[in-house]
Image: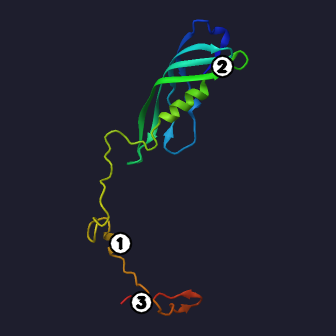
Amino acid sequence: MKVKLRLLPEEGLHLEGEDPPSILDCPGEFYRFEQPVRYALDLMETAPNRILARGRLSTVVRARCVRTLEWFDLPVEVEDFVGETETRRDEVDLTPLMREDILLALPSHPAAPGTQPLAAQPPGAGGPGSGRWNKLDQLNIAIKEPGAPPRPKKNGRFRVPPRS
C-alpha cells in the first residue's frame, strides 16, 4: 500500500481498504494467498521523512493441514499492527511491513480446525501384531552371520538363494 505524503495532514490520516493478495505471495507448499488483505490504519508523521502506521490487518489464507494434507481456510488477523518507515520522495510504501506482519502471524504447522493429532505412543508400544508393524513382520529377510562368505555371484550379479 502506497500513500502520497501530500494526502497526510498534520493531525494524521485514517485509511481503510484492501490490497490484492499478490502482496503476500511467497513460495511454499503449505499456503496459498487468494483473498485480499484488509486494513484499517492510522498514519502520522513522527519525524521528518518518517511515517508511523498503527492499526489492524486481516485476510483469509488457504492453508494445507499438516495432519490431513487437505486445504482449508485460515483466518489471519494482526490486531496490533505497528510499522514505522522512511518516506521516499513524495510517497511511503507500507506493503513490506504489512506483508511481514501477516507472514509472521501464520502458524509454522497449520492444522485444520477439528483435526486430532496422532496419538503419541511410547517406543515399543506397537510390538508384533500391533497393526502398524504387520507388513514388516511378514518380511522374511535372511541375516548374514558374521564371518560368513559373501553370496556367490552369477553373471556379475548377486544370486539370491531360494527360500526354504
* Location of mark 2 (residue): 92
- Please report the residue visible at 59 percent of the width from the left and 30 percent of the height from the top: 23
Q: Which of 119 and 151 lies nearest the eye of the viewer?
A: 119
Check the image and report above or below for 114 versus 134. above
- Residue drawn at 52 percent across, 19 percent down: 54
Residue 162 bears which disc, if any?
3
**Distance from label 2 to label 1 (Cα)?**
62 Å
Residue 33 visible to an observer of this rendering: no
Q: Residue 94 at x, y = what percent?
A: 60, 23
**Residue 58 percent coordinates (x, y):** 47, 25
Secondary structure category for the residue under label 1: helix
| Quadrant holding the N terminus | top right
Count residues near mark 2 (Cα–Cα under 10 Å), then give few for <14, some for 14-19, many for 20+. Answer: some
Q: Earlier in the sequence, mark 1 or mark 3?
A: 1
Residue 98 screen position, x and y as percent = 56, 27
Q: Position of residue 91 (x, y in %)?
A: 68, 17
Disc 2 to disc 3, how far (Cα)?
77 Å
Q: Secondary structure at mark 2?
A: strand
Q: Which residue appears at 42% of the width and 89% of the height? A: 162
Q: In which quadrant is the C terminus drawn?
A: bottom left
